[in-house]
Image (spheres, helix red, strand yellow):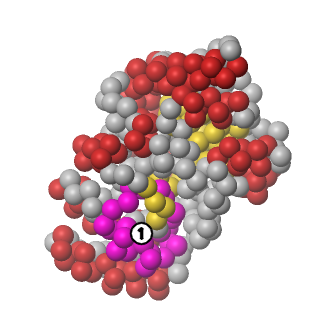
């Protein structure tokens, strides 16, 4: 598979606002590959971002889709709602009286992309059906499956994905396990890459905790064809991350994996909300995500980092300010220097 980049750096899709057409275009302009995040957007919102991205760059880019999950047991979700009532009263907001599952516009988004294909589509939280994957392939769309284990990699390979994004436990935001109730594996990224390589011949893209040149160089030396970075771009000029989130990346000391905000395991900067509610959160996604939305929105409006969902990978302290194109070039130069120091030569541009 031939990839559309001059440097093997990919801007990860970050749902909820951080990924923007401007960020995608800036990374593309520096020779990398940018992804839009369709998760939580309407189909019209997704298409608006696709149109804007095409206005800003003539280089290929991708769109990431959330694969829908079956409905969760409502009992634990309602119990968690009761546990959160004091929090809602403190913020002066109403929690949803009834929390239902939804499919995040899955069918409508697939139909829209079939009518107006983009070069790449990637999947998080699972895989499409065989007929769906076949239809996108026939439309000329290259497909990337996000995997967190060799078992998921086998399933993605059997479905005919073009490449796999191997997401290690160091990654910020949601871990892309194919089932919400699964406990994510703890195998570090480099070891996970090796384990996945044992079960698939597909090209592997490494993701998770890659915040500097030496980390990028390490995954490329380990056989990845590219490094995917999300947290590294959160403080850039083109990011849609809030001002409070940007500050917290530099100021809060550590991260933890929690279900407290959405019901799915996600790595975030540790704060008071996580400490209070993580133990009570059920493995129910997207129901818990919908349930906590009013709380998170209120905290974000006030810039209260103790109540916000501050997604961040383990290398969050390395996130740089400035233009995303400048950050991309600097990361790649640092990676080349790291390899040159280790081997006495520069890393070839792939």
Is 277 part of what is drawn in magenta? yes
* Residue for badge 1: 260
Could you say which is closer to the camera, residue 95 or residue 232?
Answer: 232
Circle 1: element type: loop
| Residue 66 rendering spot, x and y as whole percentages | 54, 53
Q: What residue appears at the point 32 percent right and 43 percent down from the top-left corner?
A: 250
Outermost residue on the top side: it is: 345
**What residue range appears in magenta?**
263-285
Could you say which is closer to the camera, residue 243 or residue 142?
Answer: 243
Say above or below: 55 vs 205: above
Could you say which is closer to the camera, residue 161 or residue 150?
Answer: 150
Would residue 86 appear left or right of 312 to someone viewing this image?
left
The quadrant in which the C terminus is found is: top right
| Residue 235 rendering spot, x and y as whole percentages | 34, 36
| Residue 158 rendering spot, x and y as whole percentages | 81, 49
The quadrant in which the N terminus is found is: top right
Q: What residue appears at the point 49 percent right and 36 percent down from the top-left corner?
A: 211
| Residue 109 rendering spot, x and y as whole percentages | 52, 47
Rendering quarter of residue 300:
bottom left
Rendering quarter of residue 89:
bottom left
Q: Is residue 297 visible?
A: no
Q: What residue appears at the point 40 percent right and 20 percent down from the top-left corner?
A: 326
Would residue 4 appear left or right of 138 to someone viewing this image?
left
Is 201 part of what is drawn in magenta? no
Say above or below: 275 vs 74: above
Mark 1 nearby-residue class (10 Å; few <14, some 14–19, many ≥20):
many
Q: What residue appears at the point 61 percent right and 48 percent down from the top-left corner?
A: 167
């Amino acid at each position: 598979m031939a990839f559309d980049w001059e440097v093997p750096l990919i801007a990860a899709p970050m749902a909820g606002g951080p990924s923007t057409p401007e960020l995608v275009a800036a990374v593309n302009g520096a020779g990398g590959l940018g992804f839009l995040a369709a998760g939580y957007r309407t189909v019209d919102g997704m298409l608006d971002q696709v149109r804007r991205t095409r206005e800003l760059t003539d280089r290929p880019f991708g769109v990431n889709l959330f694969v829908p999950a079956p409905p969760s047991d409502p009992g634990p979700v309602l119990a968690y709602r009761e546990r959160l009532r004091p929090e809602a009263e403190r913020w002066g907001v109403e929690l949803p009286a009834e929390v239902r599952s939804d499919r995040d516009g899955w069918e409508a988004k697939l139909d829209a992309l079939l009518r107006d294909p983009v070069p790449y589509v990637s999947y998080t939280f699972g895989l499409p059906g065989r007929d769906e994957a076949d239809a996108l392939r026939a439309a000329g769309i290259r497909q990337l499956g996000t995997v967190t284990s060799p078992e998921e990699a086998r399933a993605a390979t059997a479905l005919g994905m073009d490449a796999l994004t191997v997401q290690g436990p160091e990654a910020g935001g949601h871990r892309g396990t194919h089932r919400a109730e699964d406990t994510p594996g703890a195998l570090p990224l480099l070891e996970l890459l090796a384990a996945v390589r044992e079960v698939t011949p597909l090209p592997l893209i490494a993701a998770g905790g890659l915040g500097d040149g030496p980390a990028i160089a390490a995954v490329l030396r380990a056989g990845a064809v590219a490094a995917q970075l999300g947290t590294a771009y959160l403080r850039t000029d083109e990011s849609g991350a809030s001002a409070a989130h940007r500050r917290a990346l530099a100021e809060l000391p550590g991260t933890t994996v929690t279900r407290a905000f959405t019901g799915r395991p996600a790595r975030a900067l540790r704060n008071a909300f996580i400490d209070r509610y993580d133990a009570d959160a059920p493995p129910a996604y997207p129901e818990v995500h919908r349930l906590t939305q009013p709380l998170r929105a209120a905290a974000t409006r006030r810039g209260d980092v103790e109540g916000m969902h501050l997604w961040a990978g383990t290398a969050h302290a390395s996130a740089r300010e400035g233009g995303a194109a400048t950050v991309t070039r600097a990361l790649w130069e640092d990676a080349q220097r790291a390899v040159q120091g280790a081997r006495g030569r520069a890393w070839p541009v792939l």
